[in-house]
Amino acid sequence: MIETERLTLRGWRDGDVDEFMRVTNTPAVMEYLGGVRERDYFEAAADRQRSVQETAGHCFWIVERQADRALLGFCGLKILGIGGEIANDIEIGWRLREDAWGRGYAREAAQASLAWGWANLDAARIVAITVQANQRSWGLMERLGMRRRADLDFAHPAFAPDHPLSAHITYSIERPI
């Protein structure tokens, strides 16, 4: 568990899928992730996160607001698993509910995740991926000090090569000295 000034990042629990799905399975939140999904998508994602947490000690953790324990989404670290040259890199990722956007929660959770990663993992760099159209996401990457790495861009295997969400851009941040 990681605590920041306003947030708690924690592992997935039984019952999180329903609330996570309720607050993040919206057209706005899922716009660059393939659109609104069925429940089995969220159950499989939660199972993957639990498995990653058990085997690696980290995952895309649930993000809760401390003031009211509201589930805001997820943020954390995992092995990317796709993307050619970056397939085995540590990825930082986030997905927050729409009413949490613009309040600094994603940045706060991402900074805490990066700090945890540098303190606990032997990674030379941490990467983040998105589509070019997702300006909010890559804007946060830049505010975190990540830099665009066009040489690491790739076609996401979840989408057909000609799909608008296939072309993924990559940002990275090197381990602080």
Image (cartoon, rainbow, N blue to C red):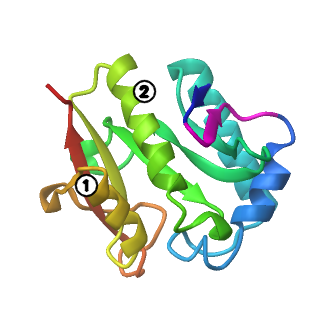
Residue drawn at the location 23% of the way across and 61% of the way down: 153
Using the rendered image of the protein, determine whether residue 80 is visible from the camera's viewpoint. no
Query: Can you see residue 143?
Result: yes
Magenta-colored stretch includes residue 70: no
Instruction: State the CA–CA distance, disc 1 to disc 2.
Output: 19 Å
The residue at which mark 1 appears reads as 171
Q: Residue at x 68, y 54 (%)?
A: 72
Q: Nearer the viewer, residue 131 or 147?
A: 147
x and y percent of residue 94 in the render? Answer: 51, 52
Instruction: Tell me which corner region of the image, top left, top right, bottom left or bottom right, holds residue 133.
Output: bottom left
Question: Mark 2 falls on what kind of element?
Answer: helix
Q: Nearer the viewer, mark 1 or mark 2?
A: 2
Residue holding disc 2:
116
Which one is nearer the viewer's eye here, 81 or 103? 103
> Is 126 situated above or below 138?
above
Give the residue type that dot 2 points to.
Trp
Q: What residue span does the magenta drawing correspond to?
A: 5-13
Instruction: Give the quadrant of residue 62.
Output: top right
Q: Nearer the viewer, residue 127 or 3?
A: 3
* Mark 1 Cα shell of 10 Å, populated few (<14), some (14-19), many (≥20): many
